[in-house]
Image (cartoon, rainbow, N blue to C red):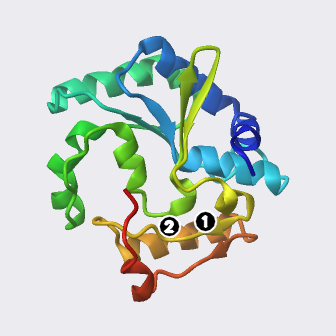
Amino acid sequence: MDEARFLALALKNPVNVAIIDELHRLALPDAWLVSGCLVQSAWNVLTGRAVDHGIADYDVFYFDPDTSWDAEDAVIRKLRAQLGHLGVKIETRNQARVHLWYPAKHALPYPPLSCSTDGIDRFLTQNTQVGVRRAGAGFEVYAPRGFDDVAGLIVRPNPGPNFSAANYTAKAERWKALWPELTVIGAERSELTAPHPT
């Protein structure tokens, strides 16, 4: 699967399009729609399901050097006000401040990030390492692992400093229940020793 095909599938979900367009209109710094909502929309088209089947939330990343909770909360509230009519859960996170709360919440290390795509690089699964945003009249896609796993309905762990085998297994089991066609690759120790690409 190439980038154009992935975009065509992911953007069949009108909620994805609406969020991407609103992020562009608001001009949030380094803002992307990321992860599961894009990949799961593609899975749904590929497997003949309703385009929003199984999508728990829509993740938005942006990167603002202001790491105060008040600044992030203002963005969360603004997006909620602008996109509330969509009737979906939107999770908005300033990637510049994830390292401030992640270790306490998950008991795992999380070094500071330098941009939103750094956050995409740290996702639990390789197949969801993807982000989309507006670029001129078209779209920009960030997908360091490409789209083969999306096309092949493969879920595979992404070794990294904040990887949790338990969290990966729980996520994969939830997905497998929703999309039985998925092939889930286990989080064995041998896979976790692989170097994380830079």
Q: Quadrant of residue 106?
A: bottom left
Quadrant of residue 97 in the image? top left
Taking the spot 75% from the left edge, 52% from the top edge, the residue there is 1
Q: Find residue 139 and report its image quarter.
A: top right
Left-right relation of 43 to 131: right
> Going 48% across and 76% down the picture, which residue do you hit?
169
Residue 141: percent from left, percent from top: 57, 36
Neighbour class for label 2 at 10 Å: few (<14), some, many (≥20)?
some
The residue identified by callout 1 is: 175
Query: Residue 78, which numbered label?
Result: none
Identify the residue shown where x is 48% and y is 71%.
157
Is residue 81 depicted above or below 150 in this figure?
A: above
Tell me where residue 184 appears, x and y as whole percent: 61, 76
Q: Residue furthest front?
A: 198
Q: Look at the picture and state if 117 lies above or below 102.
A: above
Secondary structure of residue under mark 2: helix
Q: Residue 42 appears at what percent x and percent y?
A: 72, 48
**Is any part of residue 49 visible from this angle?**
no
Residue 119, visible in the rendered structure: yes
Residue 87 falls left or right of residue 100 = right
The C terminus: image quadrant: bottom left
Q: Badge 2 is on which residue?
A: 171
Does the CB distance between marks 2 and 1 fall below 8 Å? yes
How far apart are the alpha carbons under marks 2 and 1? 6 Å
